[in-house]
C-alpha cells in the first residue's frame, strides 16, 4: 500500500453523508451538482484504491544491537499465497 | 538403561571388605550401591502423596512421596520442573516418573523425578484457576476492557511461529479479504520453555510499529502442554496490557487460554482471527456500488424537481431572469448527460446486466458456486434467475 493511500473509513463516511444530503436537503442545483461531482470523484478514488492497493508483507526482526528492522518476507510464502487466490 | 560399562562392572568381582585390612572406602560402598540400584530399577512411575514440597532458589524442587508405611526423598531439577504448570499442594496424590538412585555424597536413597502428574487436569487446572482468579480480581479479564477493532485496518501485526501452518492460514485470508493491508510478521516460539517471554517481547516490539491498527496473536492446535505458554502470567499480562487492539486465536475452538480471555477479541481458529480483523473487499465494493446508486438517484430527483418548477414559474418572469434560467437548464441537461455516462444504467442500456445475490455482486464463476437463485439488474427492472450450470472459459 502506498503511503498516499486514502483514509477509507473517512471516505465511506463522507460518501454516505453526501448521498444523504443529496437525497434529503433542499439544495441549489449548483450545490447539488457540486456535491454529486465531489461524490463521484471520491467514489472513483475509492474504487481505484480498492482495485490497486497492494499491502506489503514484512517481517519484524531485532538486529544484534537490539534495533528493530523490517524486511520483506522472502518471496516464497507471500507469492505462494497470492498464487492460490 | 544398562550400559556396556555397567555390565562389565556387574561381571567384575564384588568389592572385598572381608576384613579390617581389606576395608573398602565409603565412596566405593555408595558408588557400588548407586550402580546396583540404577541398574536394577529402571525409570518408572511411582504413586504417592506429596509432602514437604520446597522450591529452591535455583528452581529445583525438593519433596517426599509417601504412603501409609513408607516414604522416599525426591528431587526435581529445574530443567524438568519448569514444565510444571503449578507447584502441587502437600497431601496431593500424584504419580512421579523418575530414576531411583543413591545420592552418593550423602548416602541417601532418592528418586530423581522427571515429570509429575496429578489426576485428570490436576496441576494444569490448579494453575489456570489460580491465575484466572488473580487476573479477574485485578479486572484484567473484564469484558468492558475490550476495545473494538478498527473497521478498516491498514497495518496488521501477526505474532506466531514463522514456520507454523497458522501463519499461512492467516496470510491467505488477509490477502484475500483486504489485499491493501500492510502486514508485519514477528516470529515467536509458541510452545516450550521461554515461549511466554517470547510472546511478551513480540507484543512489545510489534505494538511499537508505527501506524499499527491490530495485532493477531495465534498458533494452531496442540496438547494442553503445548498451548500452556498462553496461560503463563507473563504472556497473559502482556496481552492484557497491549496498547494496540489484539485478537487472539490459540489452538482449536475447545481450547480456551487466559491470553484469549485477556484479549480484545477471541477467535476459534487462526483463519477466523484474520476474518474478524479485516473487512471483505467484495463487501466494500458492493457498499460503494450502493452509494453510487444513491448519489445518482439523489441528483436525478433534484434535477427533475428543478425542471418541474422551472416550467411552472417561467412565464411572467423578466427577460433577464429567463435567460439565466435558460443557462441553468442547459447546465442541467449537460449534467444529466454526464450522469448517463457515469451511471451503471448507461452500461445496462447497452445490453449488459448486473448479477447479484443477497446484495452481493456476482462477478466471477466462483461467486455463483454456492448460489441457486440470483437477481439480474437490467435497464428497467430486476429479473429473477437461477444457475443451471457453470462453464469456465477454456484457457
Image (cartoon, rainbow, N blue to C red):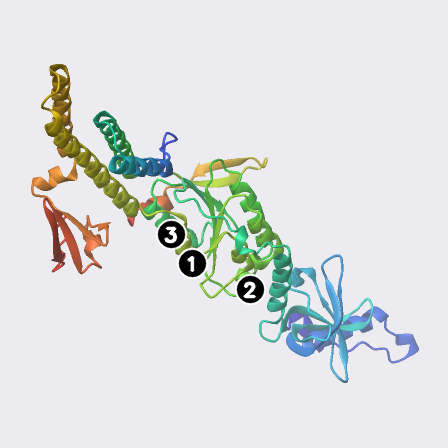
Question: What percent of the width, then of the height, locates residue B194?
Answer: 60, 53
- Please report, as a chain letter, where disc 2 is located: B
Image side of residue B295 versus residue B187, left or right:
left
- Which corner quadrant of the image does residue B258 belong to? bottom right
Q: Are marks 1 and 2 on the same chain?
A: yes
The quadrant in which the N terminus of chain B is found is: bottom right
Q: Residue at x 16, y 34 (%)?
A: B305
Mark pair 3, 1: CA separation: 10 Å
Q: Is residue B338 above or below residue B354?
A: above
Q: Are marks 2 and 3 on the same chain?
A: yes
Disc marking residue A74 = none
Query: Is residue B170 or residue A29 the one in the foreground?
Result: A29
Q: Residue at x 58, y 37 (%)?
A: A66
Image side of residue B58 versus residue B207, left or right:
right
Query: Is residue B138 or residue B234 the one in the foreground?
Result: B138
Count of residue discs: 3
**Callouts 2 and 3 close, C-beta under 8 Å:** no
| Sequence-wise first label, 3 or 1 | 1
Question: Residue placed farthest to the front in the image?
Answer: B316
Question: What percent of the width, then of the height, locates residue B40?
Answer: 68, 78
- Which corner quadrant of the image does residue B295 belong to? top left
Which residue, given by chain and number where applicable, does mark 3 sit on? B275
Image side of residue B88 versus residue A35, left or right:
right
Which residue, given by chain and number where applicable, does mark 1 sit on? B269
**Callouts 3 and 1 close, C-beta under 8 Å:** no
Question: What percent of the width, then of the height, locates residue B14?
Answer: 78, 78
Provide the secondary structure element on which disc 2 rests: loop
Judged by depth in the image, the label closer to the viewer, 2 or 3, is 3
Which residue, given by chain and number where applicable, does mark 2 sit on? B225
> Badge 2 local density, few (<14 within 10 Å), some, or many (20+)?
few
- Please report, as a chain letter, where disc 3 is located: B
- Which corner quadrant of the image does residue B292 belong to? top left
Amino acid at each position: 500500500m502506498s503511503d498516499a493511500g486514502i483514509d477509507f473509513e473517512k471516505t465511506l463516511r463522507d460518501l454516505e453523508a453526501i448521498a444523504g444530503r443529496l437525497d434529503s436537503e433542499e439544495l441549489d442545483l449548483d450545490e447539488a451538482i457540486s456535491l454529486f461531482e465531489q461524490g463521484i470523484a471520491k467514489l472513483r478514488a475509492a474504487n481505484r484504491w480498492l482495485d490497486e492497493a497492494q499491502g506489503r508483507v514484512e517481517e519484524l526482526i531485532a538486529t544484534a544491537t537490539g534495533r528493530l528492522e523490517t524486511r520483506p518476507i522472502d518471496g516464497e510464502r507471500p507469492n505462494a499465497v497470492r498464487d492460490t487466490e | 538403561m544398562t550400559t556396556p560399562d555397567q555390565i562389565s562392572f556387574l561381571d567384575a568381582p564384588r568389592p572385598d571388605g572381608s576384613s579390617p585390612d581389606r576395608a573398602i572406602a565409603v565412596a566405593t560402598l555408595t558408588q557400588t550401591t548407586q550402580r546396583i540400584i540404577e541398574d536394577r530399577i529402571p525409570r518408572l512411575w511411582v504413586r504417592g502423596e506429596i509432602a514437604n514440597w520446597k522450591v529452591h532458589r535455583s528452581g529445583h524442587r525438593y519433596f517426599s512421596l509417601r504412603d501409609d508405611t513408607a516414604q522416599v526423598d525426591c528431587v526435581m531439577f529445574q530443567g524438568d520442573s519448569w514444565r510444571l504448570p503449578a507447584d502441587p499442594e502437600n497431601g496431593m496424590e500424584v504419580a512421579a516418573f523418575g530414576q531411583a538412585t543413591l545420592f552418593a555424597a550423602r548416602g541417601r536413597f532418592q528418586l530423581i523425578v522427571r515429570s509429575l502428574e496429578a489426576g485428570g487436569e490436576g496441576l494444569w487446572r490448579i494453575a489456570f484457576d489460580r491465575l484466572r482468579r488473580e487476573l479477574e480480581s485485578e479486572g484484567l479479564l473484564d469484558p468492558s476492557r475490550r476495545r473494538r477493532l478498527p473497521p478498516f485496518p491498514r497495518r496488521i501485526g501477526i505474532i506466531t511461529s514463522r514456520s507454523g501452518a497458522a501463519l499461512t492460514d492467516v496470510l491467505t485470508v488477509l490477502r484475500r479479504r483486504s489485499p491493501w493491508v500492510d502486514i508485519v510478521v514477528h516470529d515467536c516460539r509458541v510452545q516450550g520453555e521461554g515461549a511466554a517471554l517470547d510472546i511478551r517481547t513480540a507484543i512489545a516490539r510489534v505494538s511499537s510499529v508505527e501506524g499499527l491498527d491490530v495485532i493477531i496473536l495465534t498458533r494452531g492446535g496442540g496438547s494442553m502442554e503445548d498451548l500452556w505458554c498462553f496461560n503463563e502470567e507473563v504472556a497473559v499480562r502482556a496481552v492484557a496490557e497491549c496498547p494496540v487492539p489484539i485478537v487472539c486465536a490459540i489452538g482449536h475452538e475447545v481450547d480456551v487460554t487466559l491470553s484469549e480471555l485477556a484479549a480484545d477479541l477471541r477467535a476459534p481458529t487462526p483463519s477466523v482471527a484474520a476474518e474478524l480483523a479485516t473487512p471483505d473487499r467484495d463487501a466494500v465494493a458492493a457498499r460503494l456500488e450502493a452509494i453510487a446508486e444513491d448519489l445518482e438517484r439523489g441528483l436525478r430527483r433534484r434535477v427533475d424537481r428543478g425542471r418541474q418548477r422551472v416550467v411552472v414559474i417561467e412565464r411572467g418572469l423578466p427577460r433577464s431572469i429567463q435567460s439565466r434560467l435558460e443557462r441553468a437548464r442547459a447546465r442541467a441537461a449537460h449534467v444529466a448527460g454526464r450522469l448517463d455516462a457515469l451511471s451503471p444504467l448507461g452500461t445496462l442500456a447497452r445490453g449488459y446486466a448486473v448479477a447479484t445475490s443477497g446484495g452481493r455482486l456476482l462477478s466471477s464463476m466462483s461467486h455463483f458456486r454456492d448460489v441457486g437463485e440470483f437477481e439480474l439488474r437490467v435497464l428497467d427492472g430486476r429479473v429473477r434467475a437461477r444457475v443451471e450450470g457453470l462453464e469456465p472459459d477454456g484457457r
